[in-house]
Amino acid sequence: MVIHTSEFLVLAQLDHETLEMWIEEEWLVPLNVASGRAFSEVDLARAQLIHELMRDLGVNDDGVGVVLHLLDQIHGLRKLLANASESTVGIATMPDVSSLTGDR
């Protein structure tokens, strides 16, 4: 789902200045579409997380950047692990063909 900037500001409960700062800090990375910027549901969830970190937990700007960077690393590692798991599943179920080739 593509969310245009004006709708994103309302849904994320942001003002334009704050949104621009978050984009500048690369906390949010909008899509570039013909009509300008657009955001995804993931961006909306990320904006809600940033709000929670700052408002509810009192995390400062530097801390938000660190938390988001660590979360991005975790998601990247989970994706790599999932891909590695899928690769090894095929290997684990392959039949032993050594008797056909004479290797033992």
Image: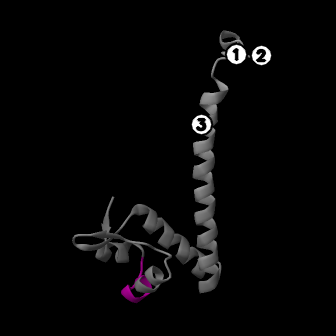
**Going by the image, does 74 lie left or right of 49?**
right
**Going by the image, does 79 lie left or right of 13?**
right
Where residue 54 appears, as percent x and y from the top left, is: 59, 81
> Is residue 79 visible to the viewer in this orientation of the structure?
yes
Residue type for callout 3: Ser
Residue in view at x 59 percent, y 85 percent: 61
Q: Which residue is mark 1?
A: 98
Residue in view at x 43 percent, y 68 percent: 44
Give above or below for 50 relative to 100: below
Q: Quadrant of the N terminus?
A: bottom left
Q: Which residue is mark 2?
A: 104
Give above or below for 4 relative to 15: above
Q: Which residue is mark 3?
A: 87
**Going by the image, does 43 lie left or right of 34?**
right
Q: Which residues are magenta?
A: 13-19
Crowdedness of circle 2 by 10 Å Cα count: few (<14), some, many (20+)?
A: few
Residue in view at x 67 percent, y 27 percent: 92
Distance CA(mark 3)–CA(mark 2): 25 Å
| Whether label 1 touches label 2, CB < 8 Å | yes
